[in-house]
């Protein structure tokens, strides 16, 4: 009998398409050792597939149940869960879909998956306390010559996504009853999105290109002047003060 660690490795390898070495350590009953492992593998695959479907319902509906099950099985074999928390499983699906040949005709699918993973991550994140007045007062109290060097904190229960595809329109399409769903123009152009946790739910906001540029720079801990320059490069009339007030009030920007 191998050591426990080696036995666990053999069982894990067998469950994910190994050479069947683990069967020799499984005690047969009314079923053979191989059949017992097959049942375990099937149940594991089914459970992980449903966990993926729960995180990626829009992706699942866009491709259909059979295709999603096939893709999920391929994904599970390549990216087995490495956490005891099922909430951590599935984060690599977007990257997997980008290189998944059967999905090559659906180039937007990976970004829809990115959107849904961010929704999932924001929902489960631990939000930081936000005080818009404190954030704005801290900025206002700085000398004019130092304000551009200010670095704001990003709300950990918030996320950004920019996609060349209408990912927000596709996600909203999924939220509607089938008879109310409009046609989606996949050539409608890029969309930028902010997701933030609010009272146990996730709110989704469409962003202008300049808003996204500002927030992406601030999320990356760039100084305020640099973030403002990124926004103004896209929109010369961008109202920086109004944007800072809005996103501080939404609890996305926090005092350092």
Image (cartoon, helix red, strand yellow):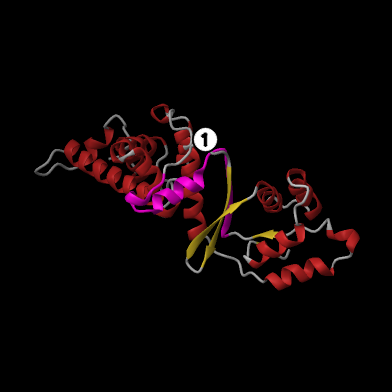
Q: Label 1 crowding class (10 Å Cα cut-off): few <14, some 14-19, many 20+?
A: few
Q: Is residue 154 visible?
A: yes
Element carrying mark 1: loop
- Horizontally, residue 189 falls left or right of residue 243, namely left
Region rendered in magenta: 157-182
**159 to the left or right of 141:** left
Please state which of residues 117 and 81 is positioned toward the viewer in this rendering.
Answer: 117
Tell me where residue 226 appears, x and y as whole percent: 79, 49
Report the quarter where the N terminus lies.
top left
Measured along the vertical axis of the image, is residue 249 above or below residue 14? below
Q: Is residue 64 above or below residue 175?
A: above
Q: Position of residue 103 (x, y in %)?
A: 41, 31
Residue at position x 23%, y 36% in the image: 23
Location of the C terminus (image quadrant): bottom right
Q: Quadrant of residue 90?
A: top left
Question: What residue is shown at x 45% (from left), y 51% (from top)?
Answer: 172
Specify the quadrant of the image occupied by residue 101. top left
- Please tell me which residue is depicted at 77% across the width and 44% down the height of the picture: 233
**Residue at 59% of width from left, 59% of height from top?**
156
Q: Would you say residue 108 sits in the magenta stretch? A: no
Q: Is residue 91 visible?
A: no
Mark 1 lies on residue: 187
């Amino acid at each position: 009998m191998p050591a426990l660690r080696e036995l666990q490795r053999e069982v894990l390898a067998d469950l994910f398409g190994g050479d069947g070495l683990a069967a020799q350590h499984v005690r047969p009953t009314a079923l053979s050792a191989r059949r017992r492992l097959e049942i375990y593998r099937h149940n594991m695959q089914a459970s992980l597939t449903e966990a993926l479907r729960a995180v990626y319902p829009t992706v699942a509906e866009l491709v259909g149940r059979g295709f999603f099950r096939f893709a999920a099985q391929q994904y599970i074999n390549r990216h087995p869960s490495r956490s005891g928390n099922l909430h951590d499983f599935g984060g690599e699906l977007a990257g997997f879909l980008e290189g998944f040949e059967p999905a090559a005709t659906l180039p937007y699918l990976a970004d829809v998956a990115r959107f849904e993973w961010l929704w999932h991550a924001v929902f489960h994140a631990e939000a930081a306390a936000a005080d818009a007045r404190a954030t704005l007062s801290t900025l206002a109290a700085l000398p004019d010559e130092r304000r551009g060097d200010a670095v704001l904190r990003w709300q950990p229960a918030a996320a950004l996504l920019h996609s060349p595809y209408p990912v927000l329109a596709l996600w909203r399409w999924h939220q509607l009853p089938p008879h109310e769903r409009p046609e989606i123009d996949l050539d409608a152009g890029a969309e930028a999105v902010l997701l933030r946790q609010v009272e146990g739910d996730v709110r989704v906001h469409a962003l202008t290109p300049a808003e996204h540029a500002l927030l992406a720079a601030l999320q990356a801990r760039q100084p305020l002047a640099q973030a403002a320059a990124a926004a103004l490069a896209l929109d010369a009339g961008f109202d920086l003060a109004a944007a800072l007030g809005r996103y501080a009030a939404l609890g996305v920007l926090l005092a350092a």
